[in-house]
Image (tube, helix red, strand yellow):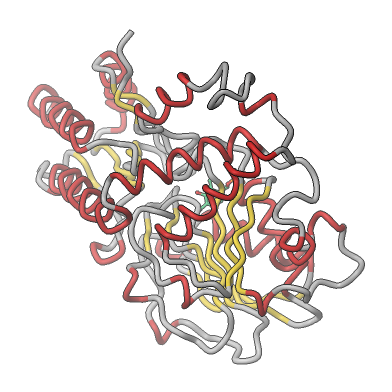
Amino acid sequence: MARAWNFSAGPAALPEEVLRQAQEELLDWHGAGCSVMEMSHRGKEFMSILAEAEADLRELMGIPEQYKVLFLQGGATQQFAQIPMNLLAGRSADYIVTGSWSKKAFKEAQRIGTVRCAANTEESGFTRLPTAEEIKLDPFAAYLHVCTNETIHGVEIPAERIADTGVPLVADMSSHILSRPVPVEKFGLIYAGAQKNIGPSGVTLVIIHRDLLGMAPLTIPTIMDYAVMAENGSMLNTPPTFGIYVAGLIFQWLKCQGGLAGMAAVNAAKAETLYACIDGSGGFYTNPVDVDCRSRMNVPFTLADARLDAVFLEEAKAAGLLGLKGHKSVGGMRASLYNAVSVEAVQVLVEFMNEFVRRNG
Ligand SMILES: *Cc1c(COP(=O)(O)O)cnc(C)c1O
């Protein structure tokens, strides 16, 4: 059976080499006599898997020593609550709302404590970033929360627009982490659910500056306390061992692809190819996002004639193109171009899209 071209928004495509390696090692990991799923998380075998995954991630992202790397559970959604639980410390925090995910993070934080909306682009249908003048920051905020890539609306904050505001910057990077180099030192906390660009679902990555540890009130559950998780090396309880193992294989794969700079070049080329197809379709396809903040990872687009949506999806599936249905809140289509989606996959997609215009335009 041939593997399809997978453009799913998440859980998403994984590199075939990584899946094959996991398959080869499934019954007997490196002579351990069992799979990673079946071994103690506190045994030396798994401890070495975890240590290597962290070391490789630190190398890939250039994570400075004063940051802790945590492999947690509960998804990015749990972080929407865990961040204010740990970091508010009786103060207020600022949120910039640029799409569905940052809107959800803001809403969840309101359940925990005092938060302010520093800017919101919902009026534009989340098709642009706020201007500097539109952002009203509280200089005393406990932190400023942003989503650096809005997976549903396809809005990405370019790296050069990440500015120092004087308060710790907290970023949801779920859908574009590891897609390009990141200046980690500009952030207080970076988090990401694994199932977009890291590995299988069930692992949540948190990279946190040491200064932000130990601020949680004693009333929060132990398992929600970053400081406790950091002290216990992400092993207060059983971590998602198999997911961490696969994430580790991905980190090794990324190192072979030229690291994050290598990935960034490939990702830029993929995105350029798809946006050129959309913009050059004479209005058959449309992406509504401002050109300067279009996501390189998640490309939503609509067909001028929505009656063709079902045919488009059906024919795409028949051509071996999966996961193109847009999010229900936006409609139309969405192609996610994560690290494991090859240049060839994007070329096949674009050829299909051009051919579809020829037959239906
Ligand atoms: C997918 C996604 C989430 C939700 O992640 P879960 O792991 O399902 O909780 C949050 N933020 C962003 C940007 C996402 O892409």
Q: Residue at coordinates 54% horizontally, 20% vertically from top-left?
A: 26
Nearer to us in this view, 331 or 158: 158
Q: Residue at coordinates 43% horizontally, 46% vertically from top-left?
A: 251
Task: Using residue 193 as the reference point, say whether residue 15 is left or right of it.
Answer: left
Q: Residue furthest bottom?
A: 139
Task: Using residue 296 as the reference point, say whether residue 82 is left or right of it.
Answer: right
Nearer to us in this view, 352 or 46: 46
Quadrant in the rendering for residue 59: bottom left
Q: Residue furthest top?
A: 1
Quadrant in the rendering for residue 360: top left
Residue 349 vs 131, above or below: the answer is above
Residue 124 vs 24, above or below: the answer is below
Q: At which x and y percent is residue 141?
A: 65, 85
Q: At which x and y percent is residue 274?
A: 19, 43
Residue 214 vs 285, above or below: the answer is below
Q: Residue furthest front?
A: 31
Task: Using residue 259 as the reference point, say whether residue 65 is left or right of it.
Answer: right
Q: At which x and y percent is residue 16?
A: 35, 27
Label count reads 0
Task: Using residue 291 as the reference point, say whether residue 103 is left or right of it.
Answer: right
Looking at the rendered image, the quarter that the C terminus falls into is: top left
Q: At which x and y percent is residue 156?
A: 37, 61
Quadrant in the rendering for residue 224: bottom right
Nearer to us in this view, 90 or 104: 90
Looking at the rendered image, the quarter that the N terminus falls into is: top left
Q: Residue at coordinates 76% horizontally, 67% vertically from top-left?
A: 227
Q: Residue at coordinates 78% horizontally, 72% vertically from top-left?
A: 113
